[in-house]
Image (cartoon, rainbow, N blue to C red):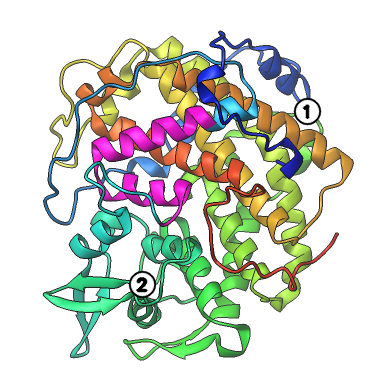
């Protein structure tokens, strides 16, 4: 998104509702397969692995660390249809995130609203979301006789996701954080995060089976912001020596192995293989956070192990995946339509085997889930790509620009379709379903804003470390 495209409609009431067409989607798909073809049995298996990925286990509406007041207004957000362009997609995404983050009032929805709107996003009662989160969800952990402040996974889902979001949003280092009846600061949260971080880059599963897939990207973002390369080695609370460049190198090597060859397959107009879809399903949001995490390291002057050239290849692969993943999700959605509501029902089954839903899922559940997965993939992908552009890490060649524009248009169309959907039945059926939509849209909204004057981040931009292609 260029600044020249950012001519937002201030008189939003003048927007004329219109049912969007699928012309842009057809044009986008024509870039690759030229059609989806027959959905084979193997694709249906891929649906189970790709459509519902790792975000089911660690999702946006995990059990909350402490009770929250009910600040919901109960007022519905009425659906509306708009033409599928940048201005309307941004408006539609902002409206859904703002409304439902406040109605849900859970920690993940609120921190993602901060992601979309910046540090001043507030709850329905006017309380700043950051103050609310920092006063309710932090806990103390004791390691080797010393206490540390952190946010538990039950609240933030991914280790250090609150920390890195607050850092990028420009929250003051003196922001108070309450835990165990004591007052800490965001500065201390960052210091304690380094102390609590455990990682063996030769074996990422040594201390945590899910570190690589569910937690590493947020740690890389936070630590790359907090620590210059000259201070990137430390001893943690367990007595382990952490060498951040080694973690970056080995983490990228693992991700490169997971993504190997997919760019060339898409360039040859071949489908993303089942094996790749299964592998990406292990990573939170299909690995898009991983790309962003590595881009953050490069932006903050980490250059070890030929990082810039390796990430140039990852950047190009990510742009190709806007097409390849979108086509795969469409195939998987078609398979879901043929299977009925089976997997939608499985969504609402808790760890104890009991349903967490109320009644039957709305009839549009499969379609809305397909939209959510498209928005999640495109929004996260474009967020990482636009972050790289914002900080001048890489510049786009003509082919990359063409593919990026096609991906942007498809994102607009999916957001507009989501805004034309009545989400109130989903709130009644299963609030987590809507919370996941909020998370996906928040990343998409931030992606659309990053290259505009409405960028929600206020952290100082480090342009001097950029790499031009």
Task: Indicate which disc residue 269 carries.
Answer: 1
At 25% from the left and 45% from the top, the residue drawn is 106
Q: Secondary structure at mark 1?
A: loop
Residue 365: quadrant of the picture: top left
Q: Secondary structure at mark 2?
A: loop
Q: Nearer the viewer, residue 141 or 99?
A: 99
Q: Quadrant of the N terminus?
A: top right
Q: Nearer the viewer, residue 50 or 220?
A: 220
The residue where tag 2 is placed is 207
Q: Is residue 43 visible?
A: no
Q: Which residue is outermost to the right? A: 398
Count of residue discs: 2
Horizontal and vertical percent position of residue 383 = 59, 47
Horizontal and vertical percent position of residue 174 = 35, 77
Q: Is residue 371 above or below residue 302?
A: above
Q: Magenta part of the protein: which range?
A: 91-119
């Amino acid at each position: 998104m260029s600044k020249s495209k950012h001519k937002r409609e201030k008189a939003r009431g003048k927007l004329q509702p219109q049912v969007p067409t699928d012309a842009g989607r057809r044009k986008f798909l024509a870039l690759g397969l030229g059609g989806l073809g027959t959905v084979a049995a193997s694709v249906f298996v891929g649906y189970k692995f790709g459509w519902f990925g790792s975000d089911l286990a660690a999702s946006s509406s995990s059990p909350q660390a402490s009770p929250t007041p009910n600040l919901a207004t109960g007022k519905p957000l009425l659906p509306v249809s708009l033409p599928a362009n940048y201005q309307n997609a941004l408006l539609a995404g902002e409206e859904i995130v703002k409304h439902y983050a406040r109605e849900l009032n859970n920690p993940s929805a609120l921190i993602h609203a901060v992601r979309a709107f910046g540090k001043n996003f507030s709850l329905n009662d006017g309380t700043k979301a950051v103050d609310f989160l920092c006063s309710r969800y932090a806990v103390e952990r004791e390691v080797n006789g010393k206490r540390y402040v952190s946010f538990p996974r039950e609240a933030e889902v991914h280790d250090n996701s609150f920390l890195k979001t607050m850092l990028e949003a420009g929250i003051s280092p003196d922001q108070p954080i309450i835990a165990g009846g004591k007052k800490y600061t965001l500065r201390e949260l960052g210091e304690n995060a380094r102390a609590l971080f455990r990682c063996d880059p030769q074996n990422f599963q040594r201390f945590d089976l899910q570190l690589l897939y569910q937690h590493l990207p947020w740690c890389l973002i936070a630590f790359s912001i907090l620590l210059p390369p000259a201070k990137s080695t430390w001893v943690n609370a367990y007595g382990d020596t952490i060498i951040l460049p080694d973690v970056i190198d080995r983490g990228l090597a693992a991700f490169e192995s997971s993504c190997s060859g997919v760019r060339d397959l898409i360039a040859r107009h071949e489908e993303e293989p089942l094996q790749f879809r299964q592998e990406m399903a292990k990573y939170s949001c299909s690995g898009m956070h991983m790309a962003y995490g590595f881009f953050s390291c490069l932006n903050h002057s980490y250059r070890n192990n030929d990082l810039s050239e390796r990430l140039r290849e990852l950047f190009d692969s990510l742009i190709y995946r806007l097409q390849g993943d979108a086509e795969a999700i469409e195939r998987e959605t078609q398979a879901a339509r043929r299977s009925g509501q089976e997997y939608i029902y499985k969504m609402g089954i808790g760890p104890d085997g009991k349903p967490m839903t109320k009644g039957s899922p709305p009839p549009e559940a499969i379609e809305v889930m397909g939209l959510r997965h498209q928005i999640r993939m495109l929004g996260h992908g474009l967020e990482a790509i636009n972050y790289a552009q914002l900080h001048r890490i890489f510049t786009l060649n003509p082919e990359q620009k063409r593919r990026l524009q096609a991906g942007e248009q498809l994102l607009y169309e999916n957001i507009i379709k989501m805004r034309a959907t009545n989400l109130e039945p989903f709130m009644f059926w299963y609030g987590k379903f809507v919370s996941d939509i909020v998370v996906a849209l928040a990343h998409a909204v931030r992606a659309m804003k990053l290259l505009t004057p409405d960028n929600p981040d206020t952290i100082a931009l480090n342009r001097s470390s950029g790499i031009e292609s």
